[in-house]
Amino acid sequence: MSAATISGAIAGLAGAIEVSGVHHFMRIGITTNFGYIGVGVGMLAGLSALWAIPSALFFGILLNGGEQMHLATGLPLVTVNTIVGMIIITVLLREILSRRVPKARFGNKPQGKKVYHNCL
């Protein structure tokens, strides 16, 4: 809970600095898809704080590269959102399949039925 509070405070401070110090007004579209991208970053990182940094860098490079490709070649910006969606679906499928498909036991002998006795 404290991590969510601290991160929310930092995000609010960053937004306040952006509005008051850089542009002096609230721009339209300043927060476009931040929540959606944040969910994708967290999912790709496997909800690990350590892996969130490379995951966020990957998404940042992907989004900025998409904007540059749009300016250079006219590629629609929707293409980048489609790629982000495909990454999220792939991560979800990996998670679902890892829970449903039993893990193979290599080198382990099959064990018989365990009997637990009630020890009172």
Image (cartoon, grey):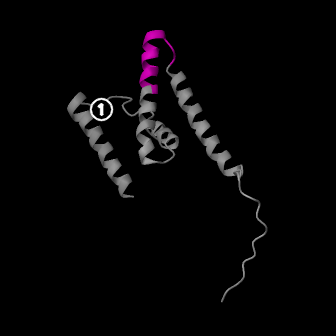
Residue occupying the point 51% across, 24% down? 80
**Position of residue 118 in the picture relative to residue 3 (left or right):** right
Which quadrant, please, contains the N terminus?
Answer: bottom left
Q: Position of residue 102 (x, y in %)?
A: 71, 52
Total numbered badges shown on the rendered structure: 1
Q: Is residue 94 left or right of residue 111?
A: left
Residue at image location 42% in from the left, 17% down from the top: 68
Residue 117 shown left or right of residue 54 in the figure: right
Q: Secondary structure at mark 1?
A: loop
Our reading of the magenta stretch's main secondary structure is: helix
Amino acid type assigned to the residue bearing label 1 in the image: Met
* Residue range of the region highlighted in magenta in the rendering: 62-76
Residue 13 location in percent, x, y? 27, 43
Q: Nearer the viewer, residue 90 or 115?
A: 115
Q: Quadrant of residue 5?
A: bottom left
The image position of residue 16, as x and y in percent, is 26, 39
Query: At which x and y percent is residue 97?
Result: 68, 45
User: Taking 103 as reference, is 91 above or below it?
Assistant: above
Looking at this view, is 113 or 22 the one in front?
Answer: 113
Q: Residue furthest bottom?
A: 120
- In terms of depth relative to the viewer, which is nearer, 119 or 18? 119
